[in-house]
Amino acid sequence: MAILSAYLIAFGSAPVAAQDVRGPVTNLPLPRYVSMKAAEGNVRRGPSLTHRIDWVFKRRGMPLQITAEYGNWRKVQDRDGAGGWVHYALLSGVRTVLIESEMLPVYARPDPNSTVNAHFETGVVARLGACSLDWCRISAGGYKGWTLKANLWGVDPSEIRE
C-alpha cells in the first residue's frame, strides 16, 4: 500500500490526455476544428481590435484549427500553420476539410472497390460528414461520397464522427 501511495504521489493517479485540454471560455476541446463563416476575416496579432492585422483569410468555409481562446477571440491556424487571432463571429462550427491529394477519388461506400462518384482536386474545400477510423464522408460541388481520412486536413486521425 505504501508503494502504491508513493507511486501515485510521484506520478499522479492518471496521465492527462491531450484531448482533456479545454478552452477557458467555451469549455470545448483544444485544439478543435471549425470553418470560416465569413467570406473575409481579419487575422490579428493579438486578441483585440487594437492589434495589427497580419493578413486576411479570404475563403468562406475554409477549415481552421482553434488552438487558444481569449474572450470573444479565437487563435486559429490554417493547414500551413499560418494564423493568428480571429473574432469568434467569423467562425462556424460547421466542419469542412481541405483535400490534400491530387484527383482524390470519392467512393460510393467506404471501400476502395466500390464505385467512384467523383475525383476532387487538391485544395477543394469539402463539407465533412461521418468518419470512421480510416474513412470520411465528404461533399462538394454537388458530389458526395467516402474517401480515406489520411488525404484530408481538418479532421484528426483518431476522430470518429456519426
Image (cartoon, rainbow, N blue to C red):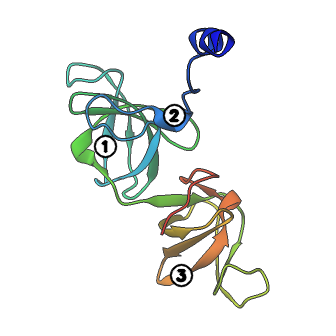
Question: Would you say residue 120 is visible in this rendering?
Answer: no
Q: Nearer the viewer, residue 56 or 94?
A: 94
**Residue at figure coordinates x 58%, y 50% from the top left:** 156
**As drawn, is 67 to the left or to the right of 160?**
left
Q: What element carries label 2?
A: loop
Question: Would you say residue 114 is visible in this rendering?
Answer: yes
The answer to whether residue 123 is above or below residue 91 is below
User: Of the residues shown, which amino acid type is indicated by label 1?
Assistant: Gly
Query: According to the image, label 2 marks what residue?
Result: 82
Q: Earlier along the polypeptide chain: callout 3 or callout 2?
A: 2
Q: Is mark 3 on a helix, strand or loop?
A: strand
Mark whose residue sits in front, 3 or 2: 3
User: Of the residues shown, which amino acid type is indicated by label 2?
Assistant: Ala
Q: In which quarter of the image is the N terminus?
A: top right
**Residue at figure coordinates x 31%, y 43% from the top left:** 41
Query: How far apart in space, not on screen, are marks 3 and 1 (Cα)?
Result: 28 Å
* Mark 1 in CB contact with mark 2 (< 8 angstroms): no
* Mark 3 in CB contact with mark 2 (< 8 angstroms): no
Are there few (<14), some (14-19), or many (20+) residues within 10 Å of tag 2?
few
**Residue at figure coordinates x 66%, y 57% from the top left:** 100
The answer to whether residue 67 is above or below residue 37 is above
Asked where in the image residue 104 lies, by quadrant, the reply is bottom right
User: Of the residues shown, which amino acid type is indicated by label 3?
Assistant: Lys
Q: Earlier along the polypeptide chain: callout 3 or callout 1?
A: 1
Query: According to the image, label 3 marks what residue?
Result: 144
Q: Earlier along the polypeptide chain: callout 1 or callout 2?
A: 1
Estimate the x, y position of residue 78 in percent, counting from the top left: 50, 42
**As drawn, is 160 to the left or to the right of 50?**
right
Query: According to the image, label 1 marks what residue?
Result: 41
* Mark 3 in CB contact with mark 1 (< 8 angstroms): no
Q: Nearer the viewer, residue 100 or 108?
A: 108
Estimate the x, y position of residue 106 in percent, counting from the top left: 65, 78
